[in-house]
Amino acid sequence: MSSTAMKPVSSRKDSPDLFVRWQRHGDEAAREALLRQYTPLARGLARRYGRSSEPFEDLLQVAMLGLLKALDRYDAARGHAFASFAVPTILGEMRRYFRDSGWAVHVPRGAQERALKVRDAQERLANQQGRAPTVHQLAEYLEIDLEDVVDALQAIQAYETLSLDAPRPRADGEVVAYGDTVGEEDDRYELVELDATITAVLGHIAPRERAILRMRFVDDLTQTQIAERVGISQMQVSRLLRRSLEQLRAMTSAAAS
Amino acid sequence: MADTANVILTLPSRPENVLVVRQALTGLAEGLGLDPVDTNDLNTAVTEACNNVVLHAYPGPQPAGEEPGQDEPLEVEVTVLAQEIAVVVRDRGTGMRPSERLEEEEQHGMGLAVIAALTREVEFADVAGGGTEVRMRFARAKPGRPLEVETDAAGAANGADAALAQLPGSVQLQLAPGALARAVLPRTLCALAARAYFTVDRISDVQLIAAAIAENAPSSVDGTHLGVGVNVEPRALALRIGPLHSGRGESVLSAAVDGLAPVVKRLTDLKRITPLGDGESLELALVDRR
């Protein structure tokens, strides 16, 4: 219980006289100087605390507001470094902002926008290179963190709001309604490796989803290959697969009992 | 302490692994239905503590081009209590002395201020045998149920400790109760697959596999920690899960729909079930061939 793993915030850059000039004499120039000096602190905190959430610029505004409050309220006479006073003040401002803006209830706007960007970039890169991109490629392409891409992939899986039935352009550029692309071909497929129960259950799965299930698990195509054949995005294939598997699981367990 | 932690994550102390910790925590927070502002506090503070280990706990950065493999550990333990989440971040470094740490950049000190501002309580301690740990306690805005960890009569049993010795992997995850896998495993494996340069196609497969494991291997055979060891290579993940009840390995392999679409069997490149203690372990390898 003895060692301290991290050093206290440095006070070496503090400028007590600037605080005196601003707080006691209302010297705007002193406040400007302090603001300039500590903007990196506010920026650093906004980046650390606000990742994957609101658009960064919005959050930086909130952090700056916190910094202004800290400049007013800091008491240099107490002997604490300004930063150790300012950090909780600025973080407190950002937390209050999150709570007030309903961030706790809704998927943050920034994360939503990012998920859409990732989804689009995924399709664009897949078209360019003929196979799905890696997370690193997406991060580089979009100039965002690896983790933002990982979060976006999770979010895309989770969003129920993305329309599966929205018309998608095919590789040849023609726009086809999604359901039209699969159904007709479906009858030609032979159901293999399925026992009678499963076959019966499969009858309740929409034809397009049945076809996708089969392409993935019987024909062993990759999701990108399926996406090309069907004329939808790989992400949609992924979500459809998951949805049909869940449906199948529910039905088979119902059939079993 | 480790025996009563709900999530124990041990991984090489490298900057890219902080992402894995964050994803595991985010998954746990989602599974617990934690308030999103609390989740953000938790993630931010734990990131600072992990960065502190990654950047400062072990002497000298690894020379460029040198084979990894001798990486020192970064350990994270999470315990879920009714009113609090307790997190310990630990290194096993011989450690930089505080005076040396004082020489470090200013940014470093800000980490401490951030942790202090976001936690209910934080303390630093020496670890027996060398190393330091940061113990953090986070308030939960909405109290929840604590997650109990079973221990044997000796009170110190941890089946997964022994099991993990036989489930080697550069990344080791222990979960108790094992049902936490549902929350923690998908994001953790997804982050590891991303690190292994998997394409998003294959990452979707990993998500399906993680879900299949979580559904079908919900507890360890001795009722304590379920262990998962993962080796990460470029475009390849090797997983070992155990100790499972006998037969569970096979249910994972044929999961998703009974009889049809054995997702895991089809989507993995190698699968092996081997006896482990009173039960068995399941080994899976996933390769991204592009």
Image: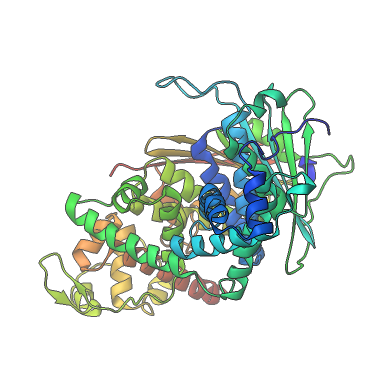
Judging depth in this view, the residue of B56 and A35 nearest the camera is A35
The quadrant in which residue A14 appears is: top right
Figure check: A139 above or below A210: above
The quadrant in which residue B11 appears is: top right
Judging depth in this view, the residue of A54 and B50 nearest the camera is A54
Q: Position of residue B135 (x, y in %)?
A: 75, 43
Q: Tag count in the figure?
A: 0
Q: Residue furthest right?
A: B153
Q: Position of residue A247 (x, y in %)?
A: 46, 73
Q: Residue furthest front?
A: A25
Residue shown at the point (39%, 50%) measured from the top left: B267
Q: Is residue B142 visible?
A: yes
- Quadrant occupied by the N terminus of chain A: top right
- Quadrant occupied by the C terminus of chain A: bottom right
Judging depth in this view, the residue of B186 and A94 nearest the camera is A94
Residue shown at the point (19%, 56%) measured from the top left: A127
Q: Position of residue A20 (x, y in %)?
A: 68, 51
Looking at the image, residue B208 sits to the left or right of residue A126; the answer is right
Q: Position of residue B5 (x, y in %)?
A: 75, 47
Residue shown at the point (17%, 53%) measured from the top left: A128
Looking at the image, residue A253 sits to the left or right of residue A179; the answer is right
Residue shown at the point (67%, 36%) measured from the top left: B163
Judging depth in this view, the residue of B270 and A39 nearest the camera is A39
